[in-house]
């Protein structure tokens, strides 16, 4: 049964809410190269300081961290992979009360929008 999800205040978002194994539930490429690793990604594993991304026939490992803009304190996910370096604005995070289920929306520099889900 699916839990009820609640919006998390992004200005007070703890970085640890982003850790864990995420599945790509939906994406809109816009002008993103459809052959790029991120455009084909199916899984994201975010552990403190480390990211593993899996796409069909491909895997990439790198580093990630959360940056915040000075004006509104909006969180950005900085991804440094072996093949790509990019930044994505966290536009929405929803979690169940117990944290067992989450939904994360990202808007990348390339214009790609992605929705990730846990578990």
Image (cartoon, grey):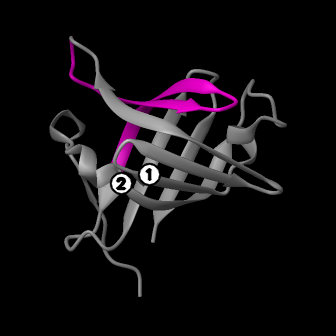
For label 2, the residue is 19
Mark 2 vs mark 1, CA separation in Å: 5 Å
Q: For this rendering, which residue is in front, 92 or 84?
A: 84
Range drawn in magenta:
71-93
Question: Is residue 54 one of those drawn in magenta?
Answer: no
- The residue at 59%/37% (across/down) is 113
Q: Position of residue 112 (x, y in %)?
A: 63, 32
**Residue drawn where x is 83% and y is 56% of the image:** 57
**Viewer can see residue 89:** yes
Q: Is residue 83 magenta?
A: yes
- Disc 1 marks which residue? 46
Tell which of 70 and 15 is nearer to you.
15
Q: Are marks 2 and 1 in contact (CB under 8 Å)?
A: yes
Asked which secondary structure carries label 1, the reply is strand
List the single residue furthest toward the top: 71
Query: What is the secondary structure assignment of the residue under circle 2?
Result: loop
């Amino acid at each position: 049964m699916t839990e009820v999800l609640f919006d998390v205040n992004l200005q007070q978002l703890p970085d640890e809410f982003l850790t864990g194994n995420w599945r790509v539930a939906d994406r809109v490429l816009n002008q993103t190269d459809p052959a790029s690793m991120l455009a084909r990604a199916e899984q994201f594993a975010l552990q403190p300081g480390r990211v593993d991304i899996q796409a069909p026939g491909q895997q990439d490992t790198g580093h990630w961290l959360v940056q915040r803009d000075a004006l509104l304190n909006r969180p950005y996910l900085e991804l440094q992979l072996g093949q790509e370096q990019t930044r994505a604005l966290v536009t929405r995070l929803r979690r169940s009360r117990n944290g067992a289920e989450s939904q994360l929306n990202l808007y990348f520099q390339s214009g790609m929008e992605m929705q990730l889900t846990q578990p």
